[in-house]
Amino acid sequence: MIQFQYERAVTAKAAISGLANNANAKFIAGGTNLIDLMKRNVMAPTKLVDINAVPLKDIQQQGGKTSIGALALNSAVADHKLILEKLPLLAQALNAGASAQIRNMATVGGNMMQRTRCSYFYDTALPCNKREPGSGCGALEGLNRMHAIFGTSEQCIAVHPSDMCVALVALDASVVVAGPKGERRIPFEEFHRLPGNQPEKDNTLQNNEMIISVEIPDNAFSKNAHYFKVRDRASYAFALVSVAAALHMDGKVIKEARLAMGGVAHKPWRLKEAEQALAGKPATEETFRQAAEIAMRGAKAFKYNAFKLKLGPNVIVEALKNAAGLV
Ligand code: SF4
């Protein structure tokens, strides 16, 4: 059994102080991933700071943006009137993730901090550079059907498992974080990182920082947005490939587009070149196929995930067709 210290914080300041001088302390909120990791000896924090009582659950719109507290539950965000009206892409992505029971426990901040579901990461008898730096990557030559096709390194080819984060990166969100020196904002695209030669690091959060909220700027994408997820089961399964697509339409012409993929990289994968290719074009299947081709440039498959090279562009096209109202 893992021994750990437990502390409850009721303010963000107290929570941040709770991590001071202990690089192996972790925050716990819903615990839907961390508890599993502790039970399986994948993670062994020496201290847990329970942040459930910190008042960070508000969802509000002001100053040209929607702000969502880090401790808002995934289900509360997905069902919130403001989110359904202004950010339906986010609601769809949240509802595509996990199960209803998990969405009722999991928080926005926890969703961002969840670890990869690479099976080698969870099996402590097998090599994994993310769990144990320098031990090797079992997935490189092993069972890599679920793994990445973009941004991989020789150290790690894992994918980030979140659906919510794919919508947030497409919608130009920012992450507000607080630490001992105050608050800072991180563009969502820079929050998660590629594995490089430090796959043990999932994101750019410092050890003593806490996620306070996520901010999404007001946009013109609420009418034409769609989250399309392909998975092995109809629910409670991680994406093989998912796509968040949002269009700002002027009649039948695309004024502006937002596009991101999930299940393909160590971070939610924004497709800016494909977005630029869509701007100013008619919303047709041909346009979407061209954008999908651009989006897939640079993709590289491994032994068991080559199907993602064909599935990826098809999911992009279907997501865009749904967003444009063509199906
Ligand atoms: Fe570990 Fe990453 Fe390799 Fe999976 S892909 S075994 S998480 S190093």
Image (tube, rainbow, N blue to C red):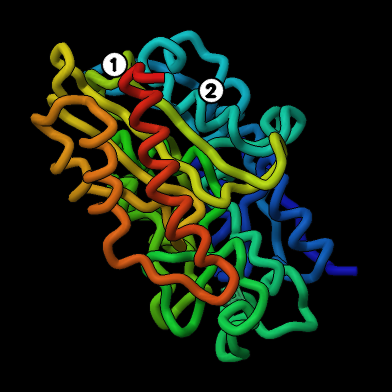
Residue kind at label 2, given as amino acid type: Val
Q: Quadrant of ligand 1?
A: bottom right
On the question of residue 113 being in view, the answer is yes
Task: Indicate the quadrant where residue 251 lies.
Answer: top left
Label 2 sits on a secondary structure element that is helix
In the image, residue 139 lies at what x, y percent?
A: 61, 77
Q: Residue at x 14, y 42 (%)?
A: 276
Residue nearest the viewer, comparing 95 with 148: 148
Q: Residues within 10 Å of mark 1 (few under 14, many from 20)?
A: few
Residue kind at label 1, given as amino acid type: Gln
In the image, residue 28 lies at what x, y percent?
A: 67, 48
Label 1 sits on a secondary structure element that is strand
Q: Is residue 248 above or below residue 313?
A: above
Q: Nearer the viewer, mark 1 or mark 2?
A: 2
Q: Residue at x 72, y 33 (%)?
A: 99
In the image, residue 199 lies at what x, y percent?
A: 49, 75
Residue that carries the numbered disc 2 in the rendered image: 77
Upstream in sequence: badge 1 or badge 2: 1
Q: Is residue 293 left or right of residue 202?
A: left
Q: Is residue 165 above or below residue 66?
A: below
Residue that carries the numbered disc 1 in the rendered image: 62
Residue nearest the viewer, comparing 126 with 309: 309
In the image, residue 221 lies at what x, y percent?
A: 28, 21
On the question of residue 14 being in view, the answer is no
